[in-house]
Amino acid sequence: MTVKIVTDSVADIPPQVAEDLGIMVVPLNVRFGTDVYRDGIDLTSDEFFIRLEHSEEVPVTSVPSPGSFADAYDALAGEADEILVITISSKLSGTNEVARQSIGLMKKRRRVEVIDSRLAIMAQGFVVIEAAKLAQTGAGFDDVKNNVYSNIPRVDMRAAFDTLEYLKRGGRIGKAQSLLGSILKINPIIGLNDGEVVPISRERSRDKAIEHLINFVASYSKIDGIAVEYATAEDEATKLVETLSIIAPKAQIYLSRASPVIGTHTGPGLLLVSVLGDK
């Protein structure tokens, strides 16, 4: 019995990794005015951040159409007996519900189950990657599903911003609302808790914010994987990878670029780390 993995583009899995592991990625959508783009397909990250900087139109995001998920399921049905779908937190997006509804639109009948990761970005991506690795070994559906549920609590992330205005504007700020309103220039740090954005810290400078990310990784006793993700600050991200490779020399480190959908809610100053491991 062959198991295939589906996720959404919010996971921000590096494209080559998704291809190597046979992960099907269903894109969310970004809209500038009347122009609608599939995340990372019709609009690259470079193109998006340039347009974000120069356009007077405020971008918005939307979930994939039910047909997008149904098409993905049908495309995999020819090679898979069972399909496991791992989505962004249902508290951040309606994508999980769309993925569930889409099962009924399939033209081919296969076992399909949808899991709410309660995560996003490469924190979600780690859960997907580990499930796909196991599926490639020929593991059964229940073993792959159990792997997902065992890894969800083993993943955490910290994200540094130069402003939370994008997150506020997109309605995803959650409890991190408490970090807004300071008259001082701060670099807020946020995390995720049970699928919601939560405040972690206020740092006085970008250097202090990056130091916070480094200390977060260093707090782990066992690290199986690290992901560094950035919007436009590639140099910062590359230097952070170098530093973290010293802290965790045996861990695989992914460098990931924020997709247009993520960039809509974070702005260009995003720099974050996700960790798969144990404290």
Image (cartoon, helix red, strand yellow):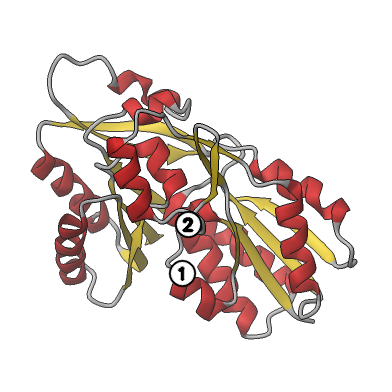
Q: Position of residue 178 (x, y in %)?
A: 33, 19
Residues under numbered marks 2 and 1 in contact, where contact means CB atoms less than 8 Å apart: yes
What's the mark number on residue 35? none
Q: Position of residue 194 (x, y in %)?
A: 52, 38
* 202 left or right, relative to 256: left
Q: Disc 2 marks which amino acid?
A: Gly
| Mark 1 crowd level (few <14, some 14–19, many ≥20, 10 Å Cα) | few
Above or below: residue 193 compared with residue 3: above
* Residue matched to label 1: 15
**Residue 267 in which image quadrant:** top left
**Residue 6 in which image quadrant:** bottom right
* Residue matched to label 2: 40
Judged from this view, the residue extending furthest toward the front is 34
Cα gap from disc 2 to disc 1, whole angstroms: 10 Å
Is there any visible trace of residue 279 in the rendered image?
no
Q: Disc 1 marks which amino acid?
A: Pro
Q: Position of residue 12 (x, y in %)?
A: 45, 57
| Mark 2 crowd level (few <14, some 14–19, many ≥20, 10 Å Cα) | many
Under circle 1, the secondary element is helix
Is there any visible trace of residue 156 in the rendered image?
yes
What's the residue at 32%, 25% (across, down)?
Answer: 165
Q: Which image quarter holds the N terminus?
A: bottom right
* 104 left or right, relative to 56: right
Q: Nearer the viewer, residue 267 or 172?
A: 267
* 35 left or right, relative to 168: right
What's the residue at 30%, 62% (across, down)?
Answer: 221
Q: Position of residue 107 (x, y in %)?
A: 89, 63
Q: From the viewer's perspective, is the residue at label 2 or at label 1 nearer? A: 2
